Amino acid sequence: MNHDAQIYHQSVLLTQALEQLGIRPGGSYIDCTLGDGGHTLAMLDASAPDGRLLGLDADPEAVAACRSRLAPYGGRAVVAQTNFADLEPVAIANGFAPVQGIFFDLGLSSRQLDAEERGFSFRRPDPLDMRFDPSEGTPAAELVNHMDEQALANLIYRLGEEHRSRRIARGIVANRPIDTALQLAEVVRRAAGYRRSRTHPATRTFQALRMGVNREMENLEVALGASLALLEQNGRLVTIAYHSLEDRLIKTFIAAAARLRPIVKRVIKPDQEEIRRNPRSRSARLRVAELV
């Protein structure tokens, strides 16, 4: 099928994800992280002519774009705006139980990073929001400007794995109020004191705030558990994570689940050609397990 030419986000590990999902015509699949719809479109094509797919995303902008993009597939594509923490009830309500494959592509899409007024990027003076769904939860500005210094340091250390979290939290508190992402990035840069770094000094702090605002680790744990109830026997769970916390949670979950069998011994990573074409893919880690 001819896809919308305006695919914004480059799908990471696309060929490997499709191969590991083992998609076949007539199957039923769930994409828990629609994003810009690149993986979703490929999954629908691979399951043609009668395969079905349920796509979830908490971001209303992503959902609106994907509903338009997936319209040519008719009833084969079902889109729901919801956090994947609600995976099980949404799947059951839409007739996707059991399914042959469940897919997670975690982290931010390029569209979200580049979107104004969302505060995900530390390179623009956007409001400090960072919520996937701007109508739900507490914006990052509340954490930055009102959280206790010790609690803020703990959050940055735990979710950002930032070893200079105390210095950064102290700097944030000393410079309150902080209104924009660009302001916060500059405060973190000065407070952290990194002289040489391959990444921006605020990267880990922004990661921690975003994950805290959206309860990403808690929601992922719930969704992984739900996948056990939704997969049929020999169904595949395929995940792509972009940082160690999520990847570690997934690895531990697969190892602890008695009914899951890892399909590949080593994590699958992008090759150098993919990294050259899409530098944002460099940290991607794909894992796959099968329900037995």
Image (cartoon, rainbow, N blue to C red):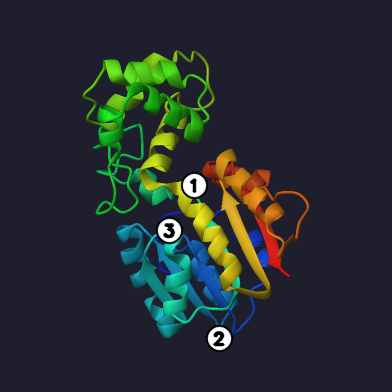
Horizontal and vertical percent for residue 272?
67, 43
Q: Distance between the residues labelled 1 and 3?
A: 18 Å
Q: Do the residues labelled 2 and 3 touch (CB within 8 Å)?
A: no
Horizontal and vertical percent for residue 240?
58, 53
In-image side of 174 versus 222 (left or right): left
- Look at discs 1 and 3 and give the one toward the viewer: 1
Q: Which residue occupies 32% across, 25% down?
A: 148
Question: Residue 94 sits in which quadrant?
Answer: bottom left
Q: Nearer the viewer, residue 223 or 56?
A: 223
Mark 3 residue element:
loop
Q: Provide the residue designation for mark 2.
A: 49
Question: Residue 239 sits in which quadrant?
Answer: bottom right
Q: Which amino acid does label 2 sit on?
A: Pro
Q: Provide the residue designation for mark 1.
A: 217
Instruction: Answer with mark 2 or mark 1, whichever residue precedes in sequence.
Output: 2
Q: Are marks 2 and 1 in contact (CB under 8 Å)?
A: no
Q: What residue type is labelled 3?
A: Gly
Instruction: Answer with mark 2 or mark 3, whichever residue precedes in sequence.
Output: 3
**185 to 11, vertically: above or below:** above
Q: What residue type is labelled 1?
A: Met
Residue 35's disc is 3
